[in-house]
Image (cartoon, rainbow, N blue to C red):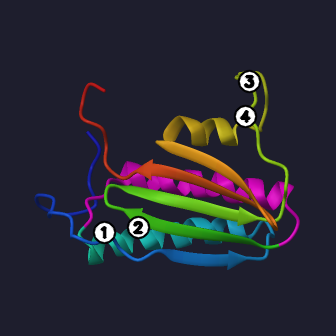
Amino acid sequence: MDQTLHNGPPAPSPVEPAPPACAAYDGATSCIGAARRFATAYLHRIHTEQRTPLTRRAVGTAQLVVSELVTNACRYAPGPLRLDLRHLRHSLEITVWDTAAALPTAHAPDPSRIGRHGLEIVLAVCAHYDVQPTSGGKRTTAVLALTDPPAGR
């Protein structure tokens, strides 16, 4: 069983989820680590201020998803990008806005392929994934559960 990031029994969730958070980046590869730290800080804030139960696994998975989405934006979209995080009671909505019009596609599973598994990973760990074209590029959204499913699932 995964360890939680709080002591004692989980506190009840507040009526209102935490306000969203947004960060803008220049699109350089150095922003990947900054985006991961931003997501981690947001999760710790909702854990502390909103008393949201949060597992270490959820934090690590959120860091992974943010890293994969931001890496794709840095690699395939010229220019700036934006990361939006929104707490949805028991999940985290992660949205990355970038300047590339091309929509990502998942490759067929191939264990011999080196690299380009990011979207496969995101699809495997997220409850919801969506990409929408925008006037200046696209918006990629993934929703990640913050709590572990019951044992046996």
Mark 3: which secondary structure?
loop
Residue 130 placement (x, y as % from top left): 61, 47
Q: Amino acid at mark 4?
A: Ala
Contact check, label 3 and label 4, Cβ < 8 Å: yes
What amino acid type should be assigned to the residue bearing mark 3?
A: Ala
Proximity of marks 2 and 1: CB atoms separated by less than 8 Å: yes
Q: The residue tagged with tag 4: helix, strand or loop?
A: loop
**Cα gap from disc 1 to disc 3, whole angstroms:** 37 Å
**Residue type, mark 2 in image:** Leu
Span shown in magenta? 52-79
Q: Mark 3: few, some, or many residues within 10 Å (few <14, many ≥20)?
A: few
Amino acid, disc 1: His
Which residue is tagged 2? 43
Q: Which quadrant is home to the N terminus?
A: top left
Q: Position of residue 95 (x, y in %)?
A: 59, 61
Q: Nearer the viewer, mark 1 or mark 4?
A: 4
Q: Which mark is on residue 47?
A: 1
* Residue with the mark numbered 4: 106
Question: Mark 3 highlights which residue?
Answer: 108
View extreme (right): residue: 78
